[in-house]
Image (cartoon, helix red, strand yellow):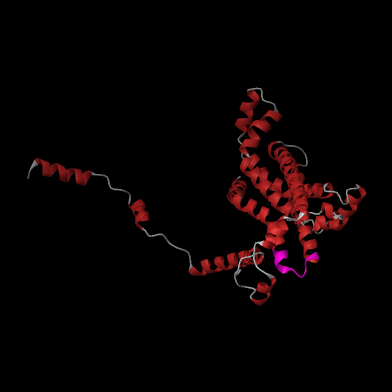
Amino acid sequence: MSATTATSRMSSTTRPKPPAGRRGKRDRPQKWGSPVTYFVALLFVGVCVAPVLFIVLGGFRTNAQITTEPAALPSPWVVGNYLDVLKSTMFWGQFANSLVVAIASTVGIVVLGLMVSFVIARYDFKLKGAMYSLFAAGLMFPMVVAITPLYLVIKDLGLVDNLLGVIIPQIAFGLPVTVIILVPFLRAIPNEIEEAAAIDGTSRLGFFFRMVVPLSLPGVVTVGILGFVGSWNNYILPLYILNSQANHTLPLGVQVFSSQYSTDTAKVLAFTSLAMLPALIFFSVFEKRIVGGLTGAVKG
């Protein structure tokens, strides 16, 4: 036997073999879920998506097409319904009101919620647990339950038929969700970072703006998105507070438009599609941010 052959055999016998567990995992085919699970998931997706598609496609049809074939695709496609809505000054006025209310409510929810969450998460004081429990209990009382006393309070403040009468309650009812999501983020920030910042001469406000806000950005984005979408789609509170058509938001505008054009179903569907489109796009674009923020809150 030659030296070369012996050397090759020795090297092959002494060569380390990959772990059997890892090799087995790599060679093992990927397991798919049960077909029943996929069927149920697709069924739920269809139930959620089908009404939206019907409304959007209905805006591209005529009333005759909707009457004769409600489930068919537009043939031909009619763009005039959407163009008529986009040319309406009423639509753009209601769009501006909804945008002002949504942005102001979102800013208030994020700023106040972040400040309250910072105090609850980072400092020890009396009634700290009671304060956190109070915000947690706020999740069990939706706005619909308190709409009558809320209207009386807003009336006493003189904010009826005023956008502030919608913005302030939305901020108040948005704080419980914000606090519940942000407190775990702020608790997860190591104390060593705060101590190092204090040694460097950073004040509490400086630590809050320089360290806390950037580190809790995923949670801030999450509560901001939820606050914006919830404010945009809010219907009950504007219905009670806003009387004049000039102050109506888009959810109220859909109701008024449906009453005025009750015989023109296609145009009503076009108006409804354009009214829900901003919130739908906003939520779809930042969907991953919401999932990431909620995952971080659960881990924290």
Q: Would you say the magenta stretch is mainly helix, strand or loop? A: helix
The residue at 64%/67% (across/down) is 54
Q: Nearer the viewer, residue 78 or 68?
A: 78
Q: Which quadrant of the rendered structure holds the N terminus?
A: top left
Please indicate, yes or no, whether residue 63 appears anywhere in the rendered image. yes
Left or right: 55 with respect to 4? right
- Residue 165 drawn in magenta: no
Is 267 magenta? The answer is: yes
* Residue 95, percent from left and from top: 74, 52
Estimate the x, y position of residue 57 in percent, counting from the top left: 63, 65
Q: Does any portion of residue 275 appear in the rendered image?
A: no
Where residue 188 sits: x, y (%)? 61, 40
Range of residues picked out in magenta: 260-269
Q: Position of residue 251 (x, y in %)?
A: 76, 58
Q: In which image quadrant can residue 240 be found? A: bottom right
Quarter-wise, where is residue 66 in the image? Answer: bottom right
172 and 300: which is toward the camera: 172
User: Residue at coordinates 81% horizontally, 46% vertically from top-left?
Assistant: 168
Work out whether 263 lies above or below 28: below
Residue depicted at 69% across the width and 37% down the height: 122
Query: 112 or 249, which lies in front?
Result: 249
Work out which residue is located at the far left of the displayed protein and give it: 1
Instruction: Classify 259 as above or below 27.
Output: below
